[in-house]
Image (cartoon, rainbow, N blue to C red):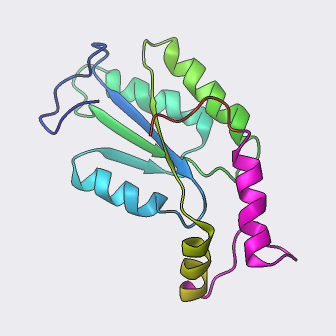
């Protein structure tokens, strides 16, 4: 990854890529804001098939994008395959994206949802705790371990 000087990544590709994902309510939005504050270009909810195009834009001559973070929602259909496909596609460009996976204890997630008076996205007909548990099971199948 680059430091805040904007220097090119160690592999020399000219762009750092971080894929931000994790449990609902664990802080993806907050992480995105922090990365923006640190000078990263952040794309939230970008369709996985457009991530490589965004990286190509960053690699283009004259582009000022040297640090790209993409927030990916694990609840989207085919997420595991999408994450693997994005990693493979970027590898063909010599880029090994970092993966920031955010999680939190069930107690904290329950408290956050109760404070916001929102239901968990996977709760549909279940308790809040069951929705969180269902998401943990779904995310356990996400392929290679995250970087962070």
Nearer-the-camera pick, 83 or 47: 83
Look at 25% across and 19% down and name the residue there: 61
In this rendering, the count of numbered labels is 0
Q: Residue furthest right?
A: 125
Look at 32% across and 15% down and name the residue there: 13
Q: Is residue 57 left or right of residue 132?
A: left
How far from the left and from the top, in percent, is residue 95?
42, 18
How far from the left and from the top, in percent, is residue 97?
45, 28
Nearer-the-camera pick, 123 or 63: 123
- Quarter placement of the N terminus: top left
How far from the left and from the top, in percent, is residue 16?
33, 29
> In which quarter of the view is residue 15 placed?
top left
Q: Is residue 123 magenta?
A: yes
State whether residue 59 is above or below residue 27.
above
> In which quarter of the view is residue 118 placed?
bottom right
Q: Is residue 43 magenta?
A: no
State whether residue 5 is above or below residue 70.
above
> In which quarter of the view is residue 122 placed?
bottom right
Q: Is residue 40 left or right of residue 72?
A: left
Query: What is the magenta range?
Result: 116-141
- Quarter placement of the C terminus: top left
Q: Residue furthest left?
A: 5
Look at 58% across and 32% down and name the residue there: 145
Nearer-the-camera pick, 71 or 133: 133
How far from the left and from the top, in percent, is residue 125?
88, 77
Q: Is residue 3 left or right of residue 87?
A: left
Look at 68% across and 38% down and name the residue there: 142
């Amino acid at each position: 990854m680059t430091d805040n000087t904007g220097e090119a990544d160690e592999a020399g590709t000219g762009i750092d890529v971080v894929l931000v994902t994790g449990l609902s309510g664990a802080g993806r939005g907050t992480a995105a804001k922090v990365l923006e504050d640190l000078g990263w270009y952040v794309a939230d909810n970008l369709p996985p098939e457009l991530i490589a195009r965004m990286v190509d834009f960053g690699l283009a001559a004259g582009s000022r994008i040297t640090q790209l973070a993409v927030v990916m929602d694990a609840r989207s259909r085919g997420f595991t395959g999408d994450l693997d496909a994005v990693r493979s596609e970027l590898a063909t460009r010599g880029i090994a994206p970092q993966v920031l996976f955010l999680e939190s204890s069930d107690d904290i997630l329950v408290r956050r949802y109760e404070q916001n008076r929102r239901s968990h996205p996977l709760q549909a007909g279940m308790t809040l705790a069951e929705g969180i548990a269902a998401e943990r099971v779904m995310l356990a199948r996400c392929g290679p371990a995250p970087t962070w």
